[in-house]
Image (cartoon, rainbow, N blue to C red):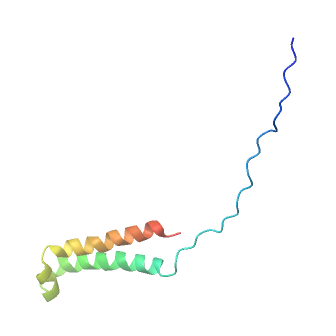
Amino acid sequence: MPKSRVRKKPVYTPPAAKSRRRAVSPPWLAPTMVACFLVGLAWIALYYVTEADMPVLSALGGWNLVCAFTLIVAGVVLATRWR
């Protein structure tokens, strides 16, 4: 049986892993995220409980839901950036 050839180049060794410092979220992110969630939820609850009898809520009409859900979506977007 013929002898196999000797490998000419060295065996692959992966490069050393860089010790990356973990990214930390800014200190304002978590409170802002929670505030967006809570204010959006409170806005929807207040809109339905008062049935838009408050001056500010009655002026906005159906846009109250858009404003509240915008706050909730902003909270979700901030939650994706939290580390």
Residue 15 at x, y = what percent?
A: 73, 51
- In terms of depth relative to the viewer, which is nearer, 83 or 46? 83
Image quadrant of residue 11? top right
Which residue is painted at 11% across and 83% down in the image? 59
Number of labels in the image equals 0
Q: Is residue 7 left or right of residue 61?
A: right
> Between residues 64 and 42, which one lies in front from this camera angle?
64
Which residue is found at the position 24% from the left and 77% from the top?
45
Q: Would you say 79 lies left or right of 53 here?
A: right
Q: Quadrant of residue 64?
A: bottom left
Residue 46 in picture, x, y percent from top left? 22, 80
Residue at x 47%, y 68% (from the top left corner): 81
In the picture shown, does residue 22 fall above or below 56? above
Q: Give the left or right position of residue 45, taking residue 61 as reference.
A: right
> Residue 52: x, y in percent?
13, 81
Q: Is residue 58 above or below residue 1?
A: below
Q: Which quadrant, please, contains the N terminus? A: top right
The residue most toward the top is 1
Percent position (x, y) of residue 61?
Answer: 12, 77
The residue at 26%/74% (across/down) is 68
Farthest residue to the front: give it.
Answer: 8
